[in-house]
């Protein structure tokens, strides 16, 4: 293609040279000198024109290369545009699908929101019911606390009474300890009396007692061993020490005997 352009340019140059030569001969009627000057001037013009033609040829060649490059870029751009159009079509389809899914999700979300509102209403009703139960329980707890406080007051009063009774018991235990000591002394004396009675019981039981007027009526008091009393028309002999609680006829230290006249 570049060779054809160069051939065309050479043809243009030849035509211009011929035209210039014809012009020179055409002006021969003006004189030899004038014709010669015009010839040389025309030759200079032809040379300048050839230079301009070469410059234009180079520019045309550069523009042609630029146009070819632009055509290649345009083809590439068209390919990219087509690819982008295909991608856009694909993305548009995906967008439609996404919008459909979005609509479905929105519908499901609305249904779930409605269910959630229903559950929320149920929860609020349950919460109110629970609050009422809590209030009822709190009232019962308060009532129970009041009863506990009353019972605590009673318990405190009872504890005070118990403390008083404990003090009394302690005092009685102290007195009882003193009584126990005295009782031990009495028991020791009674044991000694029992020994004496056991030694003389046989001889005393077989002896004849002739003076019944010496027996005194029994009284609730302490009697030594060998004491004689009468009770309910009967005579009794103290085998050993007898306390005020030992009643004749009920066993113990008292033994009934018969007087011999």
Image (cartoon, helix red, strand yellow):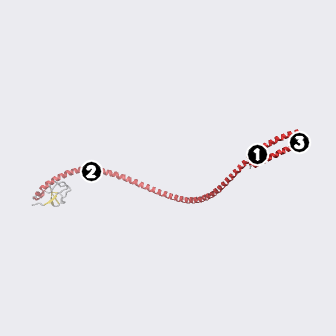
Position of 30 with respect to 138 (left or right) is: right
- How far apart, in angstroms, are the residues tagged by discs 3 and 2? 180 Å
Mark 1 against mark 2, which lies toward the viewer? Answer: 1
Q: Give how far across and how far down residue 242 sits, in percent.
A: 18, 55
Instruction: Residue under label 2, please give it.
Output: 173
Q: Give how far across and how far down residue 120 sits, in percent.
A: 54, 58
Task: Using the image as rendered, state which of residue 238 and residue 173 is in the foreground.
Answer: 173
Badges 3 and 1: C-beta atoms under 8 Å apart? Answer: no
- How far apart, in angstroms, are the residues tagged by discs 1 and 2? 149 Å
**Residue 28 marker:** 3
Return the residue found at the far right: 29
**Residue 57 marker:** 1
Q: Secondary structure at mark 3?
A: helix
Q: Residue at x 30, y 51 (%)?
A: 166
* Lower sequence index among marks 3 and 2: 3
Label 2: few (<14), some or many (≥20) within 10 Å?
Answer: few
Position of 89 with respect to 178 (left or right) is: right
Mark 3 against mark 1, which lies toward the viewer? Answer: 3
């Amino acid at each position: 293609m570049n060779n054809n352009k160069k051939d065309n340019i050479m043809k243009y140059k030849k035509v211009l040279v011929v035209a210039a030569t014809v012009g020179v001969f055409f002006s021969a009627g003006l004189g030899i000198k004038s014709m010669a000057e015009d010839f040389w001037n025309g030759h200079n013009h032809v040379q300048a024109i050839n230079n301009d033609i070469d410059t234009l040829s180079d520019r045309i060649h550069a523009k042609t290369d630029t146009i070819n490059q632009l055509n290649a870029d345009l083809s590439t751009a068209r390919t990219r545009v087509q690819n982008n159009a295909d991608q856009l079509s694909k993305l548009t389809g995906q967008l439609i699908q996404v919008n459909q899914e979005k609509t479905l999700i929105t519908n499901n979300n609305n249904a779930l929101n409605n269910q959630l509102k229903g559950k929320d209403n149920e929860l609020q009703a349950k919460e109110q019911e629970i609050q009422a139960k809590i209030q009822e329980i709190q009232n019962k707890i308060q009532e129970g606390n009041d009863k506990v406080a009353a019972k605590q007051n009673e318990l405190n009063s009872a504890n005070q009474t118990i403390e008083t009774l404990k003090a009394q018991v302690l005092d009685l235990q102290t007195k009882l300890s003193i009584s126990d000591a005295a009782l031990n002394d009495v028991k020791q004396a009674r044991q000694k009396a029992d020994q004496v009675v056991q030694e003389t019981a046989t001889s005393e039981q077989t002896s004849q007692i002739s003076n019944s007027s010496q027996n005194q009526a029994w009284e609730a008091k302490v009697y030594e061993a060998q004491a004689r009393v009468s009770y309910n028309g009967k005579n009794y002999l103290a085998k050993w020490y007898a306390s005020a609680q030992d009643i004749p006829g009920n066993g113990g230290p008292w033994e009934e005997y018969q007087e011999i006249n």
